[in-house]
Amino acid sequence: MPVDHLLPGHPSPLGATWDGLGINFALFSMHAERVQLCLFNSAGRKQVQALDLPECTDGIWHGYLPDAHPGTVYGYRVHGPYEPGAGHRFNPNKLLLDPYARKLTGQLRWSDSLFGYRLHAARGDLGFDRRDSASAVPKAVVCEDSFNWGGDTLPRTPWADTVIYEAHVRGLTRQRQDIRSDRRGSFAAFADARFIDYVKRLGVTTIELLPIHAYVQRRSLVQRGLANYWGYNTLSFFAPEPRYLATGDLNEIRIAIRRLHAAGLEVILDVVYNHTCEGNERGPTLSFRGIDNVSYYRLAADEPRHYANDSGCGNTLKLANPNVLRMVLDSLRYWAQSFHVDGFRFDLCSALGREAWGFDSGAGFFDALMQDPVLSQLKLIAEPWDIGPGGYQLGNHPPGFAEWNDRFRDTVRRYWRGDEGQRGDLAQRLSGSSDIFDHDYRKPWASINFIASHDGFTLADVTAYAEKHNEANGEDNRDGNGNEASANWGVEGPSDDPAIRATRGRVQRAMLATLMLSPGTPMLLAGDEFQRSQQGNNNAYCQDNPLSWIDWSVAEGEAGRELIAFVQRLTSCRRRVLGRAAREYMHGAQVDALDIPNLSWFDEQGEVMDEPRWSDPANRCLALRRAVPRRDAWLVSLLLFNAGANDVDFHLPAPTMRWRMFVDSGEPQARERLVEGEVYRLGARSVALLVAGDAGSGA
């Protein structure tokens, strides 16, 4: 039976919390003058009641609705000044989503009513709009947070043993013909035993998912018949994207994670706390802007009508506000504790570390995160840049973080493209990028090494296109990175020429070998293990269609099967050979038992690299010898690199050792064998791994 008012309730916890007898509602807004809780029917189409939150404690408005149950659908209307010049954009005509909403019902329907202003040629966004937006926005649904986790435990794979697989929940299984059609593209498909077995056999330990938080389709994309596929346009930091749930039940995510954990696989979420979907001052009023614009967003110091835009997406969250910081930490803990995720990758992480004076590795966000007893124990990954002043901060995030290393990506691509003068930088990347990360007791795993990610060319396209081809995005190919350090090896796009196809295959295998056999944490883009292509589109953020979805039929072809087998061999070799090189930086210290340094560089003549050799821009050959302790003995490995167009005879460096060839990217199907003599012939554009000592069973 409807009530005519709410009881006072409590200011904590924030959000809507069912206690078995009713629901407590709590919303932060330091500058509001009045807050109304709006209740809707179960379909979310009709507002049935509006009740004032009766109390405000320390900027948190709260009230208690007795006899209410999970499934209650609600939103807020927040009253206060509409003064854009002072940063305030309150408009009670706009129904607002609770920032702590756990589940959504209804889809956003683009309408002019979503905007807090009535656009006027002279006044711009200064005019006040009185149209009601309730019919066009999603609503929050109160949830009961319960699930039987049984004996689930986080795998806690050591960083040094971690191999990451970056994937998109929808695109991963949308074209899996062996999965029920009503489950494809959802967490239900993600939990399928066939997919889990495939990832395990590949040698992956950790799956990193592109954003799963509920997000908004940008109006401009909808008008062009496109979609915000990647999901970097967050509406809610607590609610999952409804399209990713085949059953509509939040436990679908928990079931998937529990099954992955049972298989020893970790799950990392890509999270976007640097901005929201509300955009700049011309954007819609959906949640944060209408609740308390001044508190939630960083505004331009000289003109609060406008937003700081270090994210490049129109706005930047104000993590310097303790209540906004609390929301972000609450969101992270919710996913960690209620869904058992194993870690987070922070989009544009530099924006999260900005204080008034710029980026600071001791910023409040980092301090709060690293002292948190739950979150500090998870895997934390930074995308170490944003577009603001001084935004490129690779290597400068605090200890405990790993960071996406675009220097590794660019160097490896240029070296294997055959660019001159790359050997010195390649040596740094093969050393775990110690020039970037070897400080503050950080370890080689802090470098997230990758050749390709969701943003940019796939591995296959790096070797098939010299230019980006983003025409399908509807922006006249102006979008996307114009410098991919790629090569087409003779013809732009697909080719039936056997020589071109063979060269592309050799370069792909060489890049994959470089990735997997380097210290640092390797990240593989889903589908790169079987030559997945996006037809040269390097900015497929708006392509929710087969262009972005993984075509698993390619994996079933001969070339796909062969490359998958090669990747499996590489991950096996990584486990067997890298050892301490993946755990500690090596700087050439003498190994007395072997009378050699623990790390040495040679040219193809077996001569130690000196300054004249490093300075030779035309030479594209390099050898790296490592010696790492293994049980009661030493394992010595020799990596040979030949980025040239011709086969090269590598003279194996002194002292003479009993070398075995573990893998040769130029001969991907060649079995492990003993190396005869003191010379190893390495094919063009190839990597070979030779090993002397105890490396366990055969690959």
Image (spheres, grey):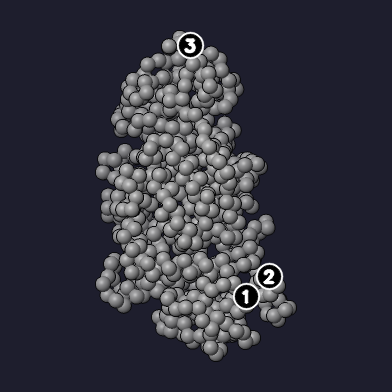
Q: Nearer the viewer, mark 2 or mark 3?
A: 2
Tag 2 residue: 631
Residue on which disc 3 sits: 5
Sort mark 2 into few (<14), some (14-19) or many (20+) by Cα contacts within 10 Å.
few
Q: Residue at x 44, y 43 (%)?
A: 212
Amino acid under disc 3: His
Q: Is residue 432 above or below residue 627?
A: above
Residue at the limit of the structure toward the bottom, as seen here = 677
In percent of width and height, residue 132 lies at: 34, 22
Gap between marks 1 and 3, in whole Å? 75 Å
Few, some or many C-alpha atoms within 10 Å of disc 1 (few <14, some 14-19, many ≥20)?
A: some
For image coordinates 65% across by 41% down, the residue present is: 373
What is the number of the mark on residue 694?
1
For label 3, the crowd category at 10 Å Cα-Cα, with few meaning under 14, some 14 to 19 and many 20 or more, is some
Return the disc, 1 or 3, that comes first in the chain's sequence: 3
Query: Is residue 450 among the parts visible in the rendering?
Result: no
- Residue at left 26%, top 72%? 496
Are the two marked residues, 1 and 2, in contact with CB atoms closer than 8 angstroms? yes
Looking at the image, residue 472 sits to the left or right of residue 26; the answer is: left
Q: Position of residue 270 (x, y in %)?
A: 48, 47
Q: Could you tell whether 120 is left or right of 670 in the image?
A: left
* Marks 2 and 3, how far apart at CA: 71 Å
- Sequence order check: which comes first, mark 2 or mark 3? 3
